[in-house]
Image (cartoon, helix red, strand yellow):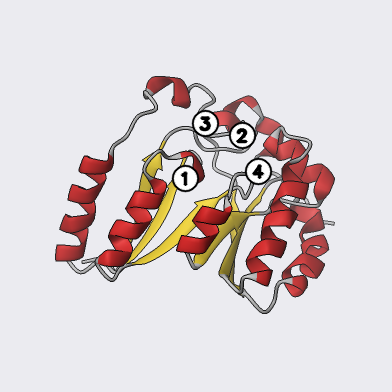
Amino acid sequence: MPKSANLIITSDCNMRCRHCYYSNDLKNIYEVKSYLKELKYIIDKLIMFGTEKFILTGGEATLSLDLLEVINYIKEKDGEVIIFSNGYNISNKIIDCCDKFSLSLDGDRNQHNYLRNNTKSFDYLINTLDILDDERKQLYIQTTITKMNINIIDSLIPIYIKYKNILKQINLVGVINTGNVLDNNELVLHDVYYT
């Protein structure tokens, strides 16, 4: 059985990213409510089958009504928790109870904010990275590669270096032509010529 599992604990999100594999309308499909009973059941089954690491994601995991309870429940069962987030809404309570974070960084300030449809996203993310660095939390960074940012990925190296003491892994993933990307076809990597 798998040693790790991704749990989508909410479909709610505080961004409308142009490159998200979800549709902008997805959050309207699900009612924002607690799924704690169901999540505990799933966690128990996964642990019974040998799962040790849980990546909590969404939507935006930090918006889950159940996030802190889910983290504590997994830790009570000796499981490992990683929060996958855009870094915009990570509170001190979340930072205090979780040791590992996977955050999305998709370019320099201009590109990151454009892709996130939010002019403050990059600054909030950097602030969160600074806090995680001060608290010595483990960090994973995910960068979604699009036609727009593929030629500036090297501009992220100074950020990777700044957080080298906590940065455990960098994931570079190609944009998926689904969800919001269908309305933002200029982001798709086909026929890209690298400079």
Residue receiving disc 2: 15
Mark 2 is on which residue type? Answer: Met
Mark 4 is on which residue type? Answer: His
Quadrant of the drawing holding the N terminus: bottom left
Residue 178 horizontal/vertical position (percent):
51, 34
Mark 1 or mark 3: which comes first in sequence? 1
Residue 187 horizontal/vertical position (percent):
69, 38
Residue receiving disc 3: 179
Q: How far separated are the C-alphas under marks 1 and 3?
A: 18 Å
Residue receiving disc 1: 61
Mark 2 or mark 3: which comes first in sequence? 2
Mark 1 is on which residue type? Answer: Ala
Which numbered disc, 2 or 3, marks the residue closer to the eye? 2
Q: Is residue 181 above or below residue 90?
A: above
Q: How far separated are the C-alphas under marks 2 and 1?
A: 12 Å
Q: How far separated are the C-alphas under marks 2 and 3?
A: 14 Å
Q: How far separated are the C-alphas under marks 4 and 2?
A: 25 Å
Residue 16 horizontal/vertical position (percent):
61, 31
| Residue 17 picture quarter | top right
Q: Label 2: how many residues lie within 10 Å, few (<14), some (14-19) or many (20+)?
A: some
